[in-house]
Amino acid sequence: MIDYSNFINGDFVDSQGGERITVTNPATGAEISKVPETPHEQIEAAIAAAEKAQPAWAALPAVVRAKHLHELADKIREKVEPLARVITEEQGKTLPLARVEVNFTADYIDYMAEWGRRIEGEVMESDRPKENIFLFRKPIGVVVGILPWNFPFFLIARKLAPALICGNSIVLKPSEETPNNAFEFCKILNETDIPAGVVNLVSGYGATVGRALTESPKVGMISFTGSVETGSRIMAAAAQNITRVNLELGGKAPAIVTAHADLDLAATAIQASRVINSGQVCNCAERIYVQRSVAEAFTGKLVEKMKAARFGNPLEDETLDYGPMINQAGYEKVVRLLDAAVSDGAQVLCGGGRGADESGFYFEPTVVANCTQAMDLVKKEIFGPVIPIVVFDELDEAIAMANDTEYGLTSSVFSNDLNEAMNLVEALKFGETYINREHFEAMQGYHAGWRKSGIGGADGKHGLHEFLQTQVVYLQRS
């Protein structure tokens, strides 16, 4: 069993006999590592190291910071296979998906590094003679990045890369469910020339370590990906110091399938969006609204594709479509939502159970028909390989049901009628809408939710600006 230590100011620092958190493999239940429940003095040391290192890091030309990030990306690519296996072992995703995550992480770091020559200010016209007005974009200072467990390695890059290229330093806290990959990342980072203190990592529970980080007056910004409940607590803690927050929270993405859809394409794309990472993705399709005239045909195609999805221990079979869910609590939530829907009249067309393997937190690919808008299965985030279907007659009905949610992250439309598709896009109240494709964003886009799905966003130019603050200068000439 591996015993990890926190990464502070360029060194791995022992937690000096403090509490240890045991990390398990969700496919087998086997214990695979222990990580620190970081004591308060080490949390403060990590923040202090970041605070001390940040001015010199910000003083470097952005193109120099970019070279450091490119070096980091190259070193990640040298270790794709061992990193992928660490991710799969602690998180449960398939090895091919873990390899994609590692490579995409390196690509994302390279992409953000290229913004080093593209961070721009503005020059504005003045009302006064001989005056110039300049807007500068400057780093915030110390950023805290609190990571989720579903794409734990990529989210390091999503928070670290824009923070660093903008001249900030960062303190990372991985999820206690999946910290191993973050410690392995720090080993790689320690092989680069990135100065000590620019990147620090402390592990532990959100209620303790996460709270201490978010309450610190030395932190300029908190970037968090996770649940609405935790995001709300982070906002409350950050409010004490009016600390900026960037929150990517839950989702309940609707997929609208109209009578003009390519049903084979829709079924393929929705199945891919539902079983990826065992359905544990905030932007994947969570509920389907299908027009009555094609409901039977579409449902048959979707059931066939969901039945074909194969799951099991991803370290034993690389050809699987998905692996286990992250833990017992996630598994029990899916069971609870499904049982309640069936009690209210829903019909399970395929799946609905744990499957043959009882060693891990597995759930069969499941399609549920005869669902209504009132069911929790339709209204609450499932985060598992289960998809409910609701039938509609008129498009206005589908729009109303799709928008009837506290979330607003992603959505999708399946229709070959361009006018119909764009009318639906105009009416949907979500930060992202996919037309005739699976739910998965691009690094050059802007991944941002409405309502309780978050504040701010990530990726692209707009995501970069989240890690900058403005200074306006009025220059009066004589």
Image: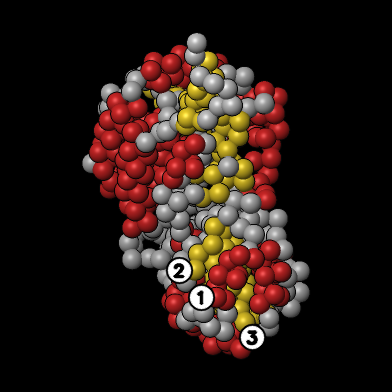
Residue 275 visible in this rendered orientation of the protein: no
Mark 3 or 1: in front is 1
Mark 2, residues whose alpha carbon is within 10 Å: few (<14), some, or many (≥20)? some
Residue at mark 3: 292
Residue 301 in the image: state x and y as whole percent: 49, 83
Residue 158 lies in quadrant:
top left
Alpha-carbon distance for marks 1 and 2?
Answer: 14 Å
Mark 1 or 2: in front is 1
In the rendered image, the quadrant that contains the N terminus is top left
Q: Which numbered tag is attached to residue 64?
A: none
Which residue is at 67% across, 23% downward? 241
Residue 166 in the image: state x and y as whole percent: 43, 29
Colour setup of the view: secondary structure
Which residue is at 48% across, 62% downward? 439
Image vertical order of residue 218 relative to residue 3, above or below = above
Alpha-carbon distance for marks 3 and 2?
Answer: 21 Å
Q: Which numbered tag is attached to residue 418?
A: 1
Residue at mark 2: 437
**Circle 1 SS class:** helix
Mark earlier in primary sequence (3, 2): 3
Alpha-carbon distance for marks 3 and 1?
Answer: 20 Å
Residue 31 in the image: state x and y as whole percent: 46, 43
Question: What amino acid type should be assigned to the residue bearing mark 3?
Answer: Arg
**Circle 2 SS class:** loop
Mark earlier in primary sequence (3, 1): 3
Image vertical order of residue 199 relative to residue 278, above or below = above
Q: 189 or 83, which is in the foreground?
A: 189
Q: 365 or 255, which is in the foreground?
A: 255
Question: What amino acid type should be assigned to the residue bearing mark 1?
Answer: Leu
Name the side, left or right, on which 70 lies relative to 463: left
Outermost residue on the top side: it is 478
Which residue is at 51% across, 75% downward? 418
